[in-house]
Amino acid sequence: MEDKGISKTEVFRQLKEFKKKDMTHRSGKILGSMCTCPHPVGLRAYQMFLESNLGDPGLFKGTKAMEDEVITLLGDLLGKQDIHGHIITGGTEANIMAMRAARNSAKLENPGIKDPEIIVPKSAHFSFKKAADMLCLNIMEAKLDSNYKVDVNSIEEMLSKNTVAVVAVAGTTELGKVDPVEDISNICLENNIYLHVDAAFGGYSIPFLTEIGYEFPKFDFKLKGVCSITIDPHKMGLAPIPTGGILFREKKYLDAMSIETPYLTEDRQSTIVGTRTGASTAATWALMKYLGREGYKKVSNQCMEITKLLYEGIIESGFEMVTEPQLNIVAFKSKDISVDELARRLENLGWAVSKSSYPRAIRVIVMPHIKEKHVKAFIEDLKSLNL
Ligand SMILES: *Cc1c(COP(=O)(O)O)cnc(C)c1O
């Protein structure tokens, strides 16, 4: 750092230079991200609460009341009003919190557990590997079936006296698949094992799409075995980043990981992060109130319509789908060139695509910033590759 500061004008001139190098969602070129343009109402609410710290809720009673209301609204969306949880930074933090709650609860019930294990689908988000590393858990990967959903038998075979949690995914990160959560819930109830559902991506769309008439398996708190759910407002919820949500069926799961806080306005804290922004909560609250179910139904329906358009265009252009889309994610490959080579050629044409690891494919997430015109331009470019 220099001794003397530079002028405000110069600071902002330089900031604009950095910004020029960033991509924008609005350009429609970002095809491989689960983030999107934050909704203007969410942005405004976010800016209003930049000062509030939910790590010290006694000082920000209004923001705390908003968080409580948001958790109830999210619980209502996911099958149970009377719910406990927090608005945090995202799906990663939510999944780490869930695994921590599961491990601690299992150890309270059964202090004999020496080598705690979690069972996650092979399709689970990599955040569970971070959780396993931080919490000293063995991680077991359950097999997938031919549609890339978890194979329930594989989970059952892996259960042991050391299992502290089973994870199911509602909207996998790579392919948008929804696991057969009901069967898994029954198995977990029978064996008295904690079940966490990672609906970071699907949580904000499956309930709305179901109301419109799309068919999905049950995945939420209506299933008695589900102990916690991750849901990310900063994905299909249109909130600015960083905004995640973690919901628990019972308060005892939060208590199982709460730590005494000596000098704050609350006595105990269960979140990983201490100082915690209230802005994310305000944005989530504002968007749920402003858009309502109708607004979110429209958003998720539009994404599905555009997904269909993209799907048909890709097939028409001579490429191969690796699986049928269940949510707004399309994964495809070429018969003639490798996935890496196809990605490279698309990147040369200005598209930021991403690649799925299992199965290897180009993966396009049709987030709300992807409009019909972008899909049409993308299809044109696919055809121009002459594959
Ligand atoms: C995006 C995602 C995560 C991770 O969320 P972050 O907000 O990036 O931390 C976890 N699980 C699933 C299923 C996801 O799609």
Image (cartoon, rainbow, N blue to C red):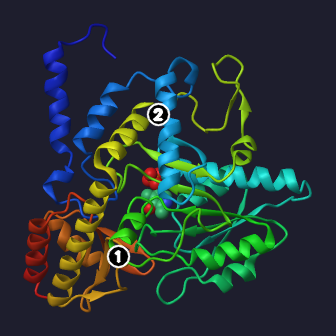
Q: Secondary structure at mark 2?
A: helix
Q: Nearer the viewer, mark 1 or mark 2?
A: 1
Q: Quadrant of residue 364?
A: bottom left
Q: Is residue 241 above or below residue 207?
A: above
Return the residue at label 1: 213
N-term-proximal mark, 1 vs 2:
2
Q: Please name whichever residue, 274 or 239, is drawn nearer the observer in this view of the structure.
A: 239
User: Where residue 111 is drawn, which disc sits there?
Assistant: none
Q: Identify residue type, mark 1.
A: Gly
Return the residue at label 2: 66
Residue that appears at 10% across and 75% down: 381
Please state the horizontal and vertical placement of residue 345, each as a whole percent of the image: 18, 73
User: Can you say which quadrant of the picture contains the N terminus?
Assistant: top left
Q: Please name whichever residue, 240 or 6, is drawn nearer the observer in this view of the structure.
A: 240
Residue that appears at 7% across and 77% down: 380
Left or right of 332 in this view: 373:
left
Q: Identify residue type, mark 2.
A: Met
Please state the horizontal and vertical placement of residue 59, each as a whole percent of the image: 53, 17
Q: Is residue 368 above or below residue 87?
A: below
Please state the horizontal and vertical placement of residue 327, each as a whole percent of the image: 36, 73
